[in-house]
Amino acid sequence: MGTEAMKAPTALTMSQVTSRPGVRPDTVRYYERIGLLPVPARTTGAHRRYDEAVLDRLRFIRGTQRLGLTLTEIGDLLSVRDTGVCPCEPAETMLERHLAEIEAEMTRLGELRAELTSLLSGMSGEKCADPLPGAWRPPDREPAEGGG
């Protein structure tokens, strides 16, 4: 077999990197500073040149942010991912925690919706309260501390 020419890695400019996943240059530089992205090679003119792999990494970062993970948590997952070990177990733990947080927030929002619906029902037609102090107010959730 003959020797095959080694294909040189594609060197992407900052503009090319930011246009594909839709991030800003300052975001890419920030991710570099905090270690989510590797420090790129530089040209003799000090311009950054990125490997194609940075695009996948940016998509991973953006996708996990949409799921509600913090940059610290994303960094932890990337560290595991970079070792070649399946990141499923740590990701599962984080996602289960975030799911529980979302469910708690949905419960809170459901309660808020019920309160607003109740408040709105008292505003229509003849049931509308006179505009006197204390006649129209949202329902109390908990007794005020310290008295009044």
Image (cartoon, helix red, strand yellow):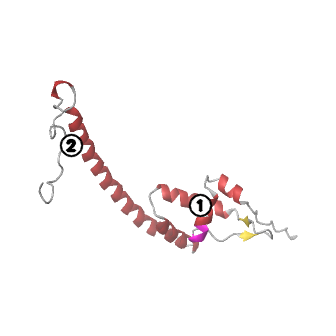
Task: Please name whichever residue, 67 or 92, is drawn nearer the observer in this view of the structure.
Answer: 67
Asked where in the image residue 56 lies, by quadrant, the reply is: bottom right
- Relative to 4, does residue 68 appear above or below in the rendering? above
- Span colored in magenta: 31-35
Q: Where is residue 57 in the image (x, y as percent from the top left)?
A: 60, 63
Q: Does the magenta stretch include residue 97?
A: no
How packed mark 2 is, by other alpha carbons closer than 10 Å (few <14, some 14-19, many 20 or more), is: few
Q: Is label 1 in a helix, a strand or a loop?
A: helix
Please tell me which of labels 2 and 1 falls first in the chain.
1
Residue ID at (15%, 41%): 134
Nearer to us: label 2 or label 1: 2
Q: Is label 2 in a helix, a strand or a loop?
A: loop
> Mark 1 = which residue?
27
Residue ID at (36%, 63%): 97
Q: What residue type is labelled 1?
A: Thr
- Relative to 18, does residue 81 appear above or below in the rendering? below
Task: Please name whichever residue, 2 or 81, is drawn nearer the observer in this view of the structure.
Answer: 81
Q: Which amino acid does label 2 sit on?
A: Pro
- State the separation of the CA atoms marked 2 and 1: 42 Å
Residue ID at (34%, 58%): 101
Asked where in the image residue 31 lies, by quadrant, the reply is: bottom right
- Relative to 30, does residue 139 appear above or below in the rendering? above
- Relative to 128, does residue 109 appear above or below in the rendering? below
Using the image, tell me which numbered label, if any, was put on residue 138. Answer: 2
